[in-house]
Image: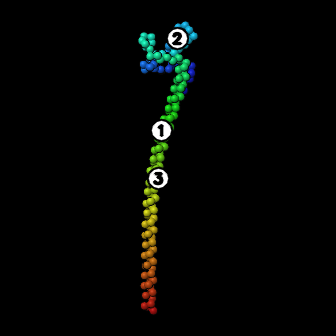
Amino acid sequence: SISKGNSSPAKLVCYHNEFAPLRTVRYDGPTKRKRFYGCSYWPEQITCGFFKWADEVDDIRDLQQIIVEKDETISDLEHQVDMLKQEMEVMRDKVKKLKAKKEKLFEEVEEIGSATTETMFELKENNTDKRLMLTLVLSFSL
Ligand SMILES: [Zn+2]
């Protein structure tokens, strides 16, 4: 941040949107030698009324610095929010895919289940047939 006192002149603009030069009070009075920023057209033309004491500008610059830092913090946070939103989107997509996979697996398990039941039923029938055949063969040979 900018330190008070030995800072270089601020780049201020007057209400004409022109560079406001740093000047020193030359007339006798309590503010003699005090430095100020004023309209760049003074004294050749009618000024726009822009006037700021240099020592007040230091405070203003500090405030502007704080505002800039706050803006940076805000844009940082906004960036983080964007990143989190993107991550959330990715996670949402993953969840969606996992749900689809889960449903597919459930379907497969059901298919396997019914297939197994059918196979077991067939095996049972086969066994019954074999047993019946065996009984027939045995009874015939006896
Ligand atoms: Zn001006």
Q: CA distance from mark 3 to mark 2?
A: 71 Å
If you read the primary sequence from the N terminus, does the residue marked by circle 1 or circle 2 appear first? 2
Identify the secondary structure beneath mark 2.
Answer: loop
Asked whether residue 86 appears in the rendered view, the answer is yes
Q: Which mark is residue 25?
A: 2
Disc 3 marks which residue?
95
Q: Residues within 10 Å of mark 2 (few under 14, many from 20)?
A: few
In front: 140, or 11? 11
If you read the primary sequence from the N terminus, does the residue marked by circle 1 or circle 3 appear first? 1
Is label 3 or label 2 in front? Answer: 2
User: Contact, CB < 8 Å: mark 3 with mark 2?
Assistant: no
Task: Name which residue type carries label 1.
Answer: His
Locate the C terminus and report the quarter of the image it occupies: bottom left
Disc 1 marks which residue?
79
Q: Residue 37 in the image: state x and y as whole percent.
A: 49, 16
| Residue found 49% across the figure and 43% down from its top | 84
Task: Name which residue type carries label 3.
Answer: Val
Q: Residue 59 in the image: state x and y as whole percent.
A: 55, 22
Task: Name which residue type carries label 2.
Answer: Val
Q: Is residue 20 above or below residue 136?
A: above
Q: Is residue 40 above or below residue 85?
A: above
If you read the primary sequence from the N terminus, does the residue marked by circle 3 or circle 2 appear first? 2
Q: Residue 5 in the image: state x and y as whole percent.
A: 57, 19
Disc 1 beta carbon < 8 A from ligand 1?
A: no
Identify the secondary structure beneath mark 3.
Answer: helix
| Residue found 53% across the figure and 20% down from its top | 57
In front: 7, or 38? 38
